[in-house]
């Protein structure tokens, strides 16, 4: 395992922040929570109120994110992570220069370039700016808000699961029943407050390490235990009724990693308590799986049908390396940074999103950026290796698996999410990155005081 110096800014991240847990939220903390809530609920506004709100809501959260970055810059907050900030500044210059180069050679246009800079840079900067500008209270309140939305999302997801595809709660204002994604006939793939199924899957992925961290955190009162169990139960319920294979596999994997890591990292005097927590978690999973047996059976059938129609290994390879034939379409210059994003497609095709370049993040990165895309992929690998290395070190120091869980989630997000292609994934990654960097500054999760 490489040392903490692998990742720029590791020394700064390893030092606990001096911000007090008590007191009012800072402006950066309020901005961060506002952006997070807009990302979570903008889909509900688009679905059930007005589809025309798409661009205004995106513009609002982008302005808040940009203001967060500008505030961190003018206040000197980036000096708290000088190496990481310098690396990000250099990468930004490369992306801008490459985008202008593509523009000059006729492979892009100005509107697409602006969209590309937004997807390739803005929310990465937002994640870092929020991490360097927030104190521990901001961090803990943000986590409480996130877990509260998870607990509130579970009943909505259950209602969607139990409602027919044509029900108002399962479709947008202008959708018809035939356009609704289903697990099997009559059972929808739930979307929660998001406009599409992938948004709900990404939300579950973001919440998972923090729900498990809350279950691991020290709890002083009975209601603390109830809240922690509610967050864990909501996570399991959302995964069970999601109808998404990725959510089931991911949540099960994270739960298994939590149970194993909690037993490994816990000090000897707390091994018994860790084992008891593992038993409670397993019982909760079994009990909820029994309650939502119809959802489990539908997902099992979906797994069987998918296994007959597609090669799992080929699908997994496509997620990490791109679809078959992607390399044949990749040029050294690229097709234009931002051209493969759903926002660019929305603008070019008058409100319709058509992924004509690539459906996977790996393929889209290479097709859009060419050599710059290859550099982006290598940069992601470096962040994954460095981040998990530091997180493991923090887990050993604090005897808690929580930091490692968060950085496993970030690593999978970087590799498999459509971060530069899809609006919700792009924004939620910025949120997850900020919380991940803060988890290294505050590895002991004092969620309940």
Image (tube, grey):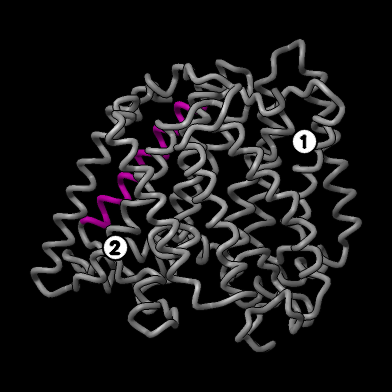
Q: Is residue 390 left or right of residue 238?
A: left
Q: Residue at x 85, y 55 (%)?
A: 289
Residue highlighted by disc 1: 228
Q: Is residue 389 magenta?
A: yes
Q: Residue at x 69, y 40 (%)?
A: 211
**Residue 308, how many percent across, how many down?**
66, 75
Locate residue 222: give its quadrant: top right
Which residue occupies the foreground of this view, 236 or 424? 424
Q: Is residue 307 left or right of residue 133?
A: right
Where 382 falls versus 150 (above or below)? above
Please say whether residue 318 is visible from this viewpoint: no
Q: Badge 2 local density, few (<14 within 10 Å), some, or many (20+)?
A: many
Which residue occupies the foreground of this view, 141 or 107? 141
Q: Residue at x 62, y 67 (%)?
A: 44
Locate residue 130: give its quadrant: top left
Circle 1: element type = helix
**Residue 139, how many percent across, how many down?**
55, 32
Question: Sequence order check: which comes first, mark 1 or mark 2?
Answer: 2
Which residue occupies the foreground of this view, 118 or 178? 118
Circle 2: element type = helix
Which stretch did the figure color magenta? 372-391
Q: Is residue 433 magenta?
A: no
Q: Residue at x 61, y 75 (%)?
A: 49
């Amino acid at each position: 395992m490489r040392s903490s110096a692998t990742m720029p800014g590791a020394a700064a991240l390893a030092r606990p922040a001096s911000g007090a847990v008590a007191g009012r939220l800072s402006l950066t903390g309020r901005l961060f929570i506002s952006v997070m809530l807009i990302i979570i609920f903008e889909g509900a506004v688009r679905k059930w109120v007005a589809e025309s709100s798409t661009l205004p809501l995106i513009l609002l959260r982008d302005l808040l994110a940009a203001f967060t970055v500008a505030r961190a810059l003018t206040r000197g907050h980036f000096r708290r992570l000088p190496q990481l900030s310098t690396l990000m500044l250099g990468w930004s210059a490369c992306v801008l220069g490459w985008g202008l180069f593509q523009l000059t050679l006729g492979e892009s246009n100005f509107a697409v370039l602006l969209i590309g800079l937004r997807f390739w840079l803005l929310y990465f900067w937002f994640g870092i700016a929020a991490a360097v500008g927030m104190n521990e209270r901001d961090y803990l309140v943000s986590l409480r808000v996130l877990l509260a939305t998870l607990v509130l999302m579970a009943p909505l997801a259950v209602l969607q699961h139990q409602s027919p595809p044509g029900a108002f709660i399962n479709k947008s204002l202008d959708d018809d029943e035939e356009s609704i994604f289903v697990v099997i006939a009559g059972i929808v793939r739930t979307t929660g407050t998001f406009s599409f199924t992938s948004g709900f899957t990404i939300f579950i992925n973001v919440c998972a390490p923090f729900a498990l961290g809350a279950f691991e955190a020290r709890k002083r009162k009975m209601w603390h235990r109830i809240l922690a169990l509610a967050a864990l139960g909501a996570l399991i319920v959302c995964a069970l009724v999601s109808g998404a294979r990725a959510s089931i596999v991911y949540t099960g994997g994270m739960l298994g990693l939590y149970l194993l890591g909690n037993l490994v990292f816990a000090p000897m005097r707390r091994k018994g308590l860790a084992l008891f927590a593992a038993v409670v978690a397993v019982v909760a999973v079994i009990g909820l799986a029994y309650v939502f047996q119809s959802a489990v059976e539908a997902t099992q059938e979906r797994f069987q049908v998918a296994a007959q129609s597609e090669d799992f290994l080929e699908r997994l390879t496509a997620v990490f390396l791109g679809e078959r034939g992607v390399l044949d379409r990749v040029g050294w210059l690229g097709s234009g940074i931002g051209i493969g994003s759903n926002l660019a497609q929305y603008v070019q095709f008058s409100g319709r999103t058509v992924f004509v370049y690539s459906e996977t993040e790996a393929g889209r990165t290479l097709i859009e950026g060419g050599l710059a895309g290859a550099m982006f992929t290598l940069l992601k690998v470096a962040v994954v290796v460095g981040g998990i290395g530091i997180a493991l070190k923090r887990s050993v120091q604090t005897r808690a698996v929580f930091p490692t869980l968060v950085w496993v989630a970030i690593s999978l997000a970087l590799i498999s999410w459509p971060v530069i292609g899809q609006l919700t994934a792009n924004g939620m990654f910025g949120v997850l990155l900020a919380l991940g960097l803060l988890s290294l500054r505050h590895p002991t999760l004092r969620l309940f005081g």
